[in-house]
């Protein structure tokens, strides 16, 4: 397999920790919900260990997984009446449903054939665990049963990649379909997390308020807000100018103590946040790498903070994840007169995300930076 993930943003991938956890019921619910406006393709991917006898799900099995010749077998479902998973997806309204059976060692070859069959821009709902090892879909949900901790090996191998773990009680899921959207052919959903836009700086090097500089016909703070809105169930703005920086749907949180820098802004907004997981972004970082943000959220579980490393000894604490529990150390740092954002991190469990120089975050610190970003040749009319 290649070293890089195959990106398929139009794919909603659904994994399962075991049997009877609501995976197919949810897939069918999505297809029914979205097939009125979009052509949705249903997919099922079954991986088979080469040379393994019996059924990959356990027991003697029916033999269909191991009976195909070659490295993979791709078939289209035509029956919408029987009780098979693929039949249920077709009955739910999928334009077509394909089943890929593939030797695990040839999974990439199989998915390339599947892409060729459906097209690279297809919108799909796919049942699979192992496929997440090589594919980065628009969304990946892992389904589990309430009260059951058992997890089959294929699920355990990819559980860390789940955008959300969904629990099924036998009748209902603990997720609302209203939070899932298709935007420009990409599956998105609102994470159980808060985004915090830092807009309280003095913008000394810029010479004017960075938050209200115009980008694509709107203030920079609105430009960032619109990128974040589909992905977070709460957005806060850190600013003492509650009127100037007020946004539709975003609460403006003033600093508890004025003129103490961005660390005080982070503390003040974390105290108001309704979520444990919080993404902090400075208003001078206009382009939100949402795939990076999703990765940081996924990897934040056992840490107080996740901070990207943009180069040797270079970090970006104002494009980072902060667990609400970090407030204890932030308060201690502020009380002792330490106001740098990195001060409390020395006492915390921090994951520094090193992507070997692949992480690029653009900061608009000066008017020249801004003019270059928006394509202006000079400062006229700014």
Image (cartoon, helix red, strand yellow):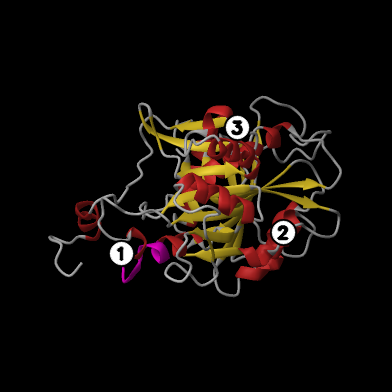
The residue nearer to you, when weighing 303 against 18, is: 303
Q: Which residue is mark 1?
A: 213
Q: Quadrant of residue 211?
A: bottom left
Q: Which residue is mark 2?
A: 175
For residue 353, say whether it is visible.
yes
Q: Which residue is mark 3?
A: 104
Q: Residues within 10 Å of mark 3 (few under 14, many from 20)?
A: some
Q: Residues within 10 Å of mark 1 (few under 14, many from 20)?
A: some
120 relative to 142 in the view: left or right: left
Per the image, label 3 sits on a secondary structure element best described as helix
The residue nearer to you, when weighing 29 against 240, is: 240
Q: Is residue 216 magenta?
A: yes
Mark nearest the camera among 3 and 2 is 2
Vertical placement of residue 199 versus 149, above or below: below
Vertical placement of residue 23 versus 226, above or below: above
| Numbered range of the magenta stretch | 214-223
Residue 221 at what x, y percent from top left?
40, 62
For residue 87, say whether it is visible.
no
* First along the sequence among labels 1 and 3: 3
Q: Residue reaching furthest top?
A: 51
| Residue at screen point 77% across, 65% down | 81
């Amino acid at each position: 397999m290649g070293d890089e993930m195959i990106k398929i943003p139009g794919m909603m991938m659904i994994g399962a920790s075991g049997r009877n956890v609501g995976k197919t019921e949810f897939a069918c619910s999505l297809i029914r919900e979205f097939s009125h406006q979009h052509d949705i393709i249903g997919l099922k991917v079954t991986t088979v260990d080469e040379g393994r006898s019996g059924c990959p799900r356990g027991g003697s099995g029916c033999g269909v997984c191991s009976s195909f010749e070659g490295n993979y077998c791709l078939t289209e479902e035509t029956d919408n009446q029987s009780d098979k998973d693929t039949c249920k997806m077709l009955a739910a309204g999928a334009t077509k449903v394909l089943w890929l059976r593939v030797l695990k060692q040839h999974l990439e070859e199989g998915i390339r054939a599947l892409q060729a069959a459906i097209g690279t821009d297809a919108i799909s709902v796919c049942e699979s665990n192992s496929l997440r090892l090589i594919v980065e879909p628009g969304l990946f949900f892992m389904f589990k049963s309430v009260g059951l901790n058992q997890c089959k090996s294929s699920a355990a191998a990819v559980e860390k990649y789940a955008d959300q773990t969904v629990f099924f009680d036998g009748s209902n899921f603990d997720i609302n379909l209203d939070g899932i959207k298709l935007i420009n052919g990409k599956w998105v959903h609102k994470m159980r997390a808060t985004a915090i836009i830092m807009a309280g700086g003095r913008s000394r090097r810029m010479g004017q308020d960075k938050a209200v500089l115009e980008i694509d016909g709107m203030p920079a703070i609105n430009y960032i807000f619109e990128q974040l809105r589909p992905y977070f169930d709460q957005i806060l703005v850190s600013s003492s100018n509650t009127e100037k920086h007020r946004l539709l749907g975003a609460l403006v949180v003033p600093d508890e103590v004025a003129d103490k820098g961005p660390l005080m802004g982070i503390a003040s907004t974390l105290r108001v946040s309704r979520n444990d997981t919080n993404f902090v972004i400075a208003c001078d970082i206009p382009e939100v790498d949402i795939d990076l943000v999703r990765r940081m959220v996924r990897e934040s579980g056992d840490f107080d903070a996740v901070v990207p490393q943009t180069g040797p000894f270079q970090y970006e604490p104002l494009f980072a994840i902060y667990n609400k529990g970090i407030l204890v150390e932030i308060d201690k740092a502020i009380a002792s007169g330490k106001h740098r954002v990195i001060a409390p991190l020395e006492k915390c469990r921090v994951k520094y995300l090193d992507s070997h120089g692949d992480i690029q975050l653009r900061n608009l610190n000066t008017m020249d930076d801004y003019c270059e970003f928006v394509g202006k040749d000079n400062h006229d009319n700014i």
